[in-house]
Protein backbone atom coordinates (compact mmCIF):
# COMPACT_ATOMS: atom_id res chain seq x y z
CA UNK A 1 0.00 0.00 0.00
CA UNK A 2 1.29 3.46 -0.72
CA UNK A 3 1.96 5.70 2.25
CA UNK A 4 -0.61 8.21 0.94
CA UNK A 5 -3.34 5.54 0.95
CA UNK A 6 -2.61 4.84 4.62
CA UNK A 7 -2.30 8.43 5.74
CA UNK A 8 -5.49 9.64 4.04
CA UNK A 9 -7.64 6.75 5.26
CA UNK A 10 -10.14 8.25 7.66
CA UNK A 11 -12.47 6.61 10.12
CA UNK A 12 -15.41 6.67 7.65
CA UNK A 13 -13.47 4.93 4.88
CA UNK A 14 -12.18 2.35 7.34
CA UNK A 15 -15.74 1.69 8.49
CA UNK A 16 -16.84 1.16 4.86
CA UNK A 17 -13.84 -1.11 4.22
CA UNK A 18 -14.69 -3.20 7.27
CA UNK A 19 -18.36 -3.40 6.27
CA UNK A 20 -17.69 -4.73 2.76
CA UNK A 21 -15.07 -7.11 4.20
CA UNK A 22 -17.71 -8.49 6.57
CA UNK A 23 -19.94 -8.98 3.49
CA UNK A 24 -17.27 -11.24 2.01
CA UNK A 25 -15.04 -8.85 0.05
CA UNK A 26 -11.96 -10.10 1.90
CA UNK A 27 -12.02 -13.55 0.36
CA UNK A 28 -13.34 -12.65 -3.12
CA UNK A 29 -15.70 -10.40 -5.06
CA UNK A 30 -19.00 -9.55 -3.49
CA UNK A 31 -21.93 -7.62 -4.92
CA UNK A 32 -22.70 -4.46 -3.01
CA UNK A 33 -25.60 -2.08 -3.54
CA UNK A 34 -25.02 1.47 -2.45
CA UNK A 35 -28.47 1.54 -0.84
CA UNK A 36 -27.74 -1.32 1.53
CA UNK A 37 -24.22 -0.08 2.26
CA UNK A 38 -25.64 3.40 2.94
CA UNK A 39 -28.11 1.88 5.34
CA UNK A 40 -25.42 0.11 7.35
CA UNK A 41 -23.11 3.13 7.36
CA UNK A 42 -26.01 5.34 8.39
CA UNK A 43 -25.20 7.62 5.44
CA UNK A 44 -26.80 8.71 2.17
CA UNK A 45 -26.48 6.62 -1.03
CA UNK A 46 -24.25 9.32 -2.44
CA UNK A 47 -21.93 9.17 0.57
CA UNK A 48 -21.74 5.36 0.46
CA UNK A 49 -20.86 5.55 -3.21
CA UNK A 50 -18.17 8.13 -2.52
CA UNK A 51 -16.65 5.97 0.21
CA UNK A 52 -16.23 3.10 -2.25
CA UNK A 53 -14.67 5.44 -4.82
CA UNK A 54 -12.23 6.71 -2.19
CA UNK A 55 -11.29 3.18 -1.16
CA UNK A 56 -10.69 2.31 -4.81
CA UNK A 57 -8.57 5.36 -5.51
CA UNK A 58 -6.61 4.65 -2.32
CA UNK A 59 -5.80 1.21 -3.68
CA UNK A 60 -7.71 -0.64 -0.97
CA UNK A 61 -10.61 -1.95 -3.07
CA UNK A 62 -11.07 -3.27 -6.61
CA UNK A 63 -14.46 -2.46 -8.14
CA UNK A 64 -16.47 -3.50 -11.17
CA UNK A 65 -19.60 -1.44 -11.83
CA UNK A 66 -22.64 -3.29 -13.20
CA UNK A 67 -26.18 -2.09 -14.00
CA UNK A 68 -27.68 -2.84 -10.59
CA UNK A 69 -24.71 -2.28 -8.30
CA UNK A 70 -21.03 -3.13 -8.12
CA UNK A 71 -18.72 -6.05 -7.39
CA UNK A 72 -16.03 -5.20 -4.88
CA UNK A 73 -13.08 -7.06 -3.41
CA UNK A 74 -10.35 -5.99 -1.01
CA UNK A 75 -6.89 -5.58 -2.49
CA UNK A 76 -3.83 -6.85 -0.61
CA UNK A 77 -3.37 -3.32 0.69
CA UNK A 78 -6.98 -3.32 1.90
CA UNK A 79 -6.41 -6.55 3.78
CA UNK A 80 -3.20 -5.19 5.30
CA UNK A 81 -5.12 -2.13 6.50
CA UNK A 82 -7.66 -4.28 8.33
CA UNK A 83 -4.96 -6.53 9.73
CA UNK A 84 -3.17 -3.53 11.13
CA UNK A 85 -6.38 -2.43 12.90
CA UNK A 86 -6.77 -5.97 14.19
CA UNK A 87 -3.19 -5.96 15.56
CA UNK A 88 -3.94 -2.73 17.46
CA UNK A 89 -7.02 -4.23 19.09
CA UNK A 90 -5.19 -7.45 19.86
CA UNK A 91 -2.45 -5.49 21.60
CA UNK A 92 -5.04 -3.52 23.59
CA UNK A 93 -6.96 -6.51 24.82
CA UNK A 94 -4.41 -9.30 24.91
CA UNK A 95 -1.85 -7.35 26.89
CA UNK A 96 -4.40 -6.67 29.58
CA UNK A 97 -4.60 -10.45 30.06
CA UNK A 98 -0.94 -10.75 30.98
CA UNK A 99 2.42 -9.05 30.82
CA UNK A 100 5.33 -9.28 28.41
CA UNK A 101 8.74 -7.98 29.40
CA UNK A 102 11.95 -7.98 27.45
CA UNK A 103 15.58 -7.34 28.10
CA UNK A 104 19.11 -8.54 27.56
CA UNK A 105 21.00 -11.35 29.25
CA UNK A 106 23.60 -10.16 31.72
CA UNK A 107 26.06 -11.57 34.24
CA UNK A 108 25.29 -10.76 37.89
CA UNK A 109 27.13 -11.05 41.15
CA UNK A 110 27.41 -14.84 41.16
CA UNK A 111 25.26 -15.11 44.31
CA UNK A 112 22.18 -16.61 42.67
CA UNK A 113 23.61 -20.13 42.62
CA UNK A 114 24.21 -20.03 46.38
CA UNK A 115 20.69 -18.97 47.29
CA UNK A 116 18.86 -21.18 44.79
CA UNK A 117 20.54 -24.34 46.08
CA UNK A 118 19.94 -23.69 49.79
CA UNK A 119 17.87 -26.62 51.14
CA UNK A 120 15.21 -24.34 52.72
CA UNK A 121 14.45 -22.85 49.29
CA UNK A 122 15.06 -25.98 47.23
CA UNK A 123 12.43 -27.94 49.19
CA UNK A 124 9.85 -25.24 48.48
CA UNK A 125 10.76 -24.93 44.78
CA UNK A 126 10.25 -28.67 44.40
CA UNK A 127 6.85 -28.67 46.12
CA UNK A 128 5.54 -25.32 44.84
CA UNK A 129 7.03 -25.10 41.34
CA UNK A 130 7.28 -28.82 40.57
CA UNK A 131 10.98 -28.87 39.69
CA UNK A 132 14.46 -28.54 41.17
CA UNK A 133 15.88 -25.35 39.67
CA UNK A 134 19.30 -25.21 38.06
CA UNK A 135 21.47 -23.57 40.75
CA UNK A 136 21.55 -19.94 39.73
CA UNK A 137 19.42 -17.16 38.34
CA UNK A 138 19.50 -15.97 34.74
CA UNK A 139 19.73 -12.19 35.02
CA UNK A 140 18.05 -9.77 32.61
CA UNK A 141 18.61 -6.05 32.10
CA UNK A 142 15.09 -4.86 31.25
CA UNK A 143 14.60 -2.48 28.34
CA UNK A 144 12.97 0.90 29.01
CA UNK A 145 9.33 0.01 28.20
CA UNK A 146 9.67 -3.09 30.37
CA UNK A 147 11.05 -1.08 33.30
CA UNK A 148 7.97 1.13 32.99
CA UNK A 149 5.55 -1.82 32.94
CA UNK A 150 7.39 -3.80 35.61
CA UNK A 151 5.02 -2.63 38.40
CA UNK A 152 2.35 -4.74 36.67
CA UNK A 153 4.32 -7.80 37.71
CA UNK A 154 2.55 -7.85 41.05
CA UNK A 155 -0.81 -8.38 39.27
CA UNK A 156 0.43 -11.57 37.58
CA UNK A 157 -0.15 -15.11 38.80
CA UNK A 158 2.46 -16.01 41.42
CA UNK A 159 3.65 -18.61 43.91
CA UNK A 160 4.90 -17.60 47.37
CA UNK A 161 8.19 -18.95 48.71
CA UNK A 162 8.29 -18.51 52.49
CA UNK A 163 11.11 -17.22 54.66
CA UNK A 164 12.89 -19.88 56.70
CA UNK A 165 15.51 -20.21 59.43
CA UNK A 166 18.78 -22.03 59.63
CA UNK A 167 19.83 -21.97 63.28
CA UNK A 168 21.31 -18.50 63.59
CA UNK A 169 20.02 -16.77 60.47
CA UNK A 170 16.78 -16.07 58.65
CA UNK A 171 16.47 -16.30 54.88
CA UNK A 172 14.00 -13.95 53.21
CA UNK A 173 10.79 -14.82 51.40
CA UNK A 174 10.51 -14.61 47.61
CA UNK A 175 7.77 -14.50 44.97
CA UNK A 176 7.88 -16.67 41.85
CA UNK A 177 5.90 -15.76 38.73
CA UNK A 178 5.35 -18.55 36.17
CA UNK A 179 6.65 -17.36 32.79
CA UNK A 180 7.28 -18.46 29.23
CA UNK A 181 10.68 -17.48 27.88
CA UNK A 182 11.18 -16.66 24.21
CA UNK A 183 14.57 -16.23 22.61
CA UNK A 184 15.36 -16.12 18.92
CA UNK A 185 12.03 -17.73 17.95
CA UNK A 186 12.42 -20.55 20.50
CA UNK A 187 10.10 -20.96 23.46
CA UNK A 188 11.08 -22.41 26.83
CA UNK A 189 8.76 -23.44 29.67
CA UNK A 190 8.62 -23.71 32.62
CA UNK A 191 10.52 -20.76 33.96
CA UNK A 192 9.77 -18.46 36.90
CA UNK A 193 10.68 -14.85 37.50
CA UNK A 194 11.97 -14.84 41.06
CA UNK A 195 11.72 -11.68 43.13
CA UNK A 196 13.41 -12.09 46.52
CA UNK A 197 12.20 -9.82 49.32
CA UNK A 198 15.86 -9.06 50.02
CA UNK A 199 17.92 -8.39 46.94
CA UNK A 200 20.82 -6.32 45.70
CA UNK A 201 19.13 -5.85 42.33
CA UNK A 202 17.01 -2.83 41.40
CA UNK A 203 13.83 -2.49 39.33
CA UNK A 204 15.79 -2.63 36.09
CA UNK A 205 16.85 -6.21 36.68
CA UNK A 206 14.96 -9.43 36.69
CA UNK A 207 16.05 -12.94 37.66
CA UNK A 208 14.74 -16.14 36.13
CA UNK A 209 14.92 -19.71 37.37
CA UNK A 210 14.27 -22.91 35.43
CA UNK A 211 14.93 -26.66 35.69
CA UNK A 212 17.85 -26.32 33.26
CA UNK A 213 20.71 -23.96 32.62
CA UNK A 214 18.97 -21.62 30.19
CA UNK A 215 22.23 -20.32 28.72
CA UNK A 216 22.87 -23.86 27.49
CA UNK A 217 19.28 -24.84 26.63
CA UNK A 218 18.74 -21.73 24.46
CA UNK A 219 22.37 -20.94 23.53
CA UNK A 220 22.22 -17.54 25.27
CA UNK A 221 25.10 -15.15 25.81
CA UNK A 222 25.38 -11.79 27.53
CA UNK A 223 23.73 -9.11 25.39
CA UNK A 224 21.19 -11.44 23.74
CA UNK A 225 17.60 -10.17 23.77
CA UNK A 226 14.86 -12.34 25.24
CA UNK A 227 11.22 -11.81 26.16
CA UNK A 228 9.17 -13.30 28.94
CA UNK A 229 5.42 -13.70 29.03
CA UNK A 230 3.41 -13.86 32.23
CA UNK A 231 -0.26 -14.53 32.90
CA UNK A 232 -2.51 -12.33 34.96
CA UNK A 233 -3.71 -13.67 38.32
CA UNK A 234 -7.30 -14.89 37.99
CA UNK A 235 -8.54 -13.92 41.45
C1 LIG B 1 15.68 -17.38 46.63
C2 LIG B 1 16.54 -16.20 46.93
C3 LIG B 1 16.65 -15.75 48.22
C4 LIG B 1 17.45 -14.67 48.53
N1 LIG B 1 17.55 -14.29 49.83
C5 LIG B 1 18.40 -13.28 50.16
C6 LIG B 1 18.62 -12.90 51.49
O1 LIG B 1 18.06 -13.50 52.42
N2 LIG B 1 19.47 -11.88 51.74
C7 LIG B 1 20.13 -11.20 50.74
O2 LIG B 1 20.90 -10.29 51.01
N3 LIG B 1 19.92 -11.51 49.45
C8 LIG B 1 19.10 -12.56 49.14
N4 LIG B 1 18.92 -12.91 47.83
C9 LIG B 1 19.38 -12.02 46.78
C10 LIG B 1 20.80 -12.13 46.32
O3 LIG B 1 21.63 -11.62 47.32
C11 LIG B 1 20.97 -11.28 45.07
O4 LIG B 1 20.19 -10.13 45.13
C12 LIG B 1 20.63 -11.96 43.79
O5 LIG B 1 19.71 -12.96 43.89
C13 LIG B 1 21.93 -12.42 43.22
O6 LIG B 1 21.77 -12.55 41.90
P1 LIG B 1 22.98 -12.72 40.95
O7 LIG B 1 24.05 -13.47 41.62
O8 LIG B 1 22.34 -13.46 39.83
O9 LIG B 1 23.40 -11.34 40.56
C14 LIG B 1 18.14 -14.00 47.52
C15 LIG B 1 18.02 -14.44 46.20
C16 LIG B 1 17.24 -15.53 45.90
C17 LIG B 1 17.15 -15.98 44.47
N1 LIG C 1 18.19 -21.34 34.93
C1 LIG C 1 19.38 -20.74 34.84
C2 LIG C 1 20.00 -20.12 35.96
C3 LIG C 1 21.24 -19.52 35.82
N2 LIG C 1 21.85 -19.53 34.63
C4 LIG C 1 23.24 -19.01 34.52
O1 LIG C 1 23.98 -19.74 35.46
C5 LIG C 1 25.05 -18.94 35.99
C6 LIG C 1 24.97 -18.93 37.52
O2 LIG C 1 23.90 -18.13 37.99
P1 LIG C 1 24.12 -16.99 39.08
O3 LIG C 1 22.83 -16.35 39.36
O4 LIG C 1 24.85 -17.61 40.22
O5 LIG C 1 25.12 -16.01 38.36
P2 LIG C 1 24.91 -14.51 37.83
O6 LIG C 1 23.50 -14.38 37.37
O7 LIG C 1 25.18 -13.64 39.01
O8 LIG C 1 25.88 -14.29 36.75
C7 LIG C 1 24.92 -17.59 35.36
O9 LIG C 1 25.73 -17.55 34.21
C8 LIG C 1 23.46 -17.55 34.93
O10 LIG C 1 23.24 -16.68 33.84
C9 LIG C 1 21.24 -20.12 33.53
O11 LIG C 1 21.78 -20.13 32.44
N3 LIG C 1 20.02 -20.72 33.66
MG1 LIG D 1 21.84 -14.70 38.55
Image (spheres, rainbow, N blue to C red):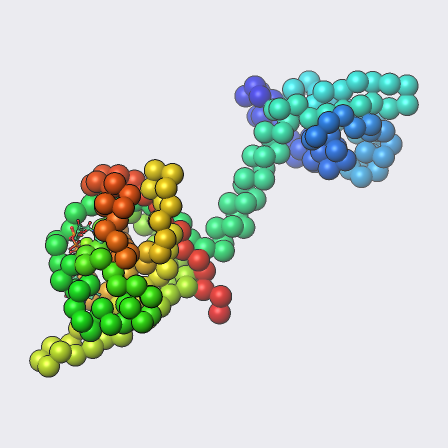
Q: Is residue 74 placed above or below 183 in the rendered structure?
A: above
For the residue pair 104 and 192, the one nearer the viewer reads as 192
Q: Is residue 147 left or right of residue 85?
A: left
Q: Is residue 137 placed above or below 126 in the rendered structure?
A: above
- The image position of residue 71, as x and y in percent, is 80, 23
Among the 4 quarters of the image, the one containing residue 82: top right
In this view of the protein, can residue 141 be seen by the observer?
no
Q: Is residue 217 left or right of residue 171?
A: right
At 30% from the left edge and 40% from the top edge, which residue is drawn? 225
- The image position of residue 138, as x and y in percent, is 23, 52
Q: Is residue 120 placed above or below 61 in the rendered structure?
A: below
At 86% from the left edge and 18% from the top edge, which residue is drawn? 66
- The image position of residue 152, as x and y in percent, is 39, 58
At 58% from the left edge and 37% from the top edge, which residue is drawn? 85
Among the 4 quarters of the image, the one containing residue 164: bottom left
Q: Is residue 115 left or right of residue 175?
A: left
Amino acid sequence: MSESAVSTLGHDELQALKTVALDGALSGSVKVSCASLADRLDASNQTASRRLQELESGGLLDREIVADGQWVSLTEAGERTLRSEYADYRQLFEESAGLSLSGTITTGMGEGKHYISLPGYERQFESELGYTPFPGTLNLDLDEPSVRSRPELSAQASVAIDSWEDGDRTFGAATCYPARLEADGETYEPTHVIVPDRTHHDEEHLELIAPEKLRDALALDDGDTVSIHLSEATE
